[in-house]
């Protein structure tokens, strides 16, 4: 068996195959120690509760915008925070998130603001 590169896109260190992978780093790990890919993703999701949103954030603005209506209010807030973490936030994505939040607020209040 060979090795496979495992990256840690979470905010905390993870352990894979007895090897610590610091946050934001990656390591080559012997495949014999790796779980099947779907289980590895579950392990990462358990380490970072926002792993799915971090993966979504890596996509294009067009792809993310199409999925915004399906996200919860809490997920929208978290996605907005994740987008601004690296200091390179995309203004068009932030505007799309704000638009969905505004639409939801208007629907809850019973109409458009005066």
Image (spheres, rainbow, N blue to C red):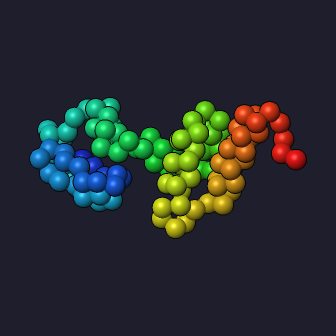
Please state, as top left, top right, bottom left or bottom right, where the N terminus lies in the image: top left
Left or right side of 86 for 89: right
Residue at 56% across / 52% down in the picture?
80
Horizontal and vertical percent position of residue 22 = 24, 58
**Residue at point 83%, 36% (across, down):** 111
* Nearer to me, 114 or 79: 114
* Residue 100: percent from left, percent from top: 69, 42
Front residue of 55/95: it is 95
Q: How many marks?
A: 0
Q: Tell me: 56 left or right of 33.
A: right
- Quadrant assignment, res 37: top left
- Please indicate, yes or no, whether residue 4 appears anywhere in the rendered image: yes
**Visible residue check, residue 62:** no
Q: Nearer the viewer, residue 55 or 13?
A: 13
In the rendered image, residue 69, in percent from the top left (x then y), is placed at 65, 35
Return the x and y of residue 24 as percentages of the image width and height. 33, 59
Q: Residue at x 32, y 34 (%)?
A: 42
Give above or below for 28 relative to 88: above
Residue at horizontal 71 percent and vertical 40 percent from the top: 105
Work out whether 25 lies above or below 114.
below
């Amino acid at each position: 068996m060979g090795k496979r590169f495992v990256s840690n896109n979470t905010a905390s260190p993870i352990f894979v195959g007895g090897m610590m992978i610091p946050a934001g780093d990656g390591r080559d790990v012997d495949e014999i120690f790796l779980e099947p890919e779907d289980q590895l993703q579950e392990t990462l999701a358990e380490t970072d509760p926002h792993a799915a949103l971090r993966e979504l954030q890596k996509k294009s603005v067009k792809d993310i915008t199409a999925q915004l209506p399906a996200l919860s209010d809490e997920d929208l807030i978290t996605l907005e925070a994740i987008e601004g973490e690296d200091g390179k936030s995309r203004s068009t994505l932030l505007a799309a998130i704000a638009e969905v939040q505004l639409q939801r607020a208007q629907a809850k209040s019973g109409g458009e603001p005066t």
